[in-house]
Image (spheres, rainbow, N blue to C red):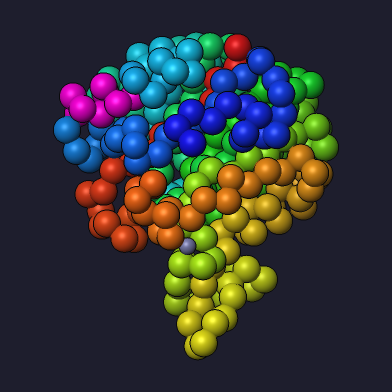
Amino acid sequence: LLKLASEQIFNLSDTKISAGFSARLSGNMSLFYGEIQYSLENRKNFLDNLGIDYKGLVCAKQVHGGNIKYVTEQDKGSGALNYGASIEATDAFITDKKNLPLAIFTADCLSVFLYDPKRQAIGLVHAGWRSSRESIVAKTIKLMEQEFHTNACDLHVGFGPAIRSCCYEVDKDFKDFFPKEVLEREGSFFLDLIRVNKRQAEESGVLETNIRDSGFCTFCRNEEFFSFRREGKSCGRMLSVMMLR
Ligand SMILES: [Zn+2]
């Protein structure tokens, strides 16, 4: 559970990428919430196991928007040691550069891993409901097509832990944004954020057989994962990371 390799995220045996997501056991990974010194230690311990240098991490100030950034060597280490140096207002990264570890921080929001083994390119997306409403996954795939000549049918997509439709109660208004993915149960409404992003990936041309879902609900399994909804704003953040080798 701690350090899931590419096989567990993509159901793909491939030594050219390192990818994983942390859980509660690895501790808080945020430099924005909590004690910085502990978060840096937690990052180092977690990333050492994946063979990734924590000082090279590319981090963003995530704003639940629709901005995607193509990051290169000059961005290496942005936000790795202090939050202020994170890339501004971005919720998704793409790159075709090796040894450039992309980071996304979550506690209920969905992390989406994208890997194009043919073009050797990757993407990592912070997909909360707002960014999902802005079709951030579809836009990230489009940008990979533009920048790397990715064919969506080659893409492998993996979903990290997130709050799921069992627990993600929303206002009825959400039906306007996600008519097919808001489910009604006993007069309450629940959003299936994973289904939203799966649909966007499939509509972009990703094959269903290339999509893999970790299946973990952060709210149900709060003893194993951080949950913003259950614990509040100051709860820990988990790290999703991916790097080309
Ligand atoms: Zn749940």
Instruction: Report if residue 137 is visible in the image.
Output: no
What number of labels is visible? 0
Q: Percent position (x, y) of residue 45?
A: 34, 20
In the displayed structure image, the side of residue 154 where residue 135 appears, left or right: left
In the displayed structure image, the side of residue 50 where residue 142 appears, left or right: right
| Residue 232 higher or lower than 32, as above or below | below
Q: Does the magenta-highlighted stretch encompass residue 41?
A: yes
Q: Quadrant of residue 236?
A: top left
| Residue 25 higher or lower than 162, as above or below | above
Q: Quadrant of residue 35?
A: top left
Instruction: Report if residue 164 is visible in the image.
Output: yes
Q: Residue at x 39, y 46 (%)?
A: 224
Q: Residue at x 34, y 37 (%)?
A: 25
Q: Residue at x 62, y 34 (%)?
A: 8
Looking at the rendering, the stretch of residues picked out in magenta corresponds to: 36-43
Q: Percent position (x, y) of residue 237?
A: 33, 41
Q: Nearer the viewer, residue 45 or 242?
A: 45
The secondary structure that dominates the magenta segment is: helix
Q: Nearer the viewer, residue 63 or 158?
A: 158
Q: Percent position (x, y) of residue 244?
A: 60, 17
Residue at the extreme bottom: 187
Q: Residue at x 51, y 67 (%)?
A: 166
Q: Percent position (x, y) of residue 90?
A: 45, 38
Q: Does the magenta-highlighted stretch encompass residue 62?
A: no
Q: Nearer the viewer, residue 42 or 114?
A: 42
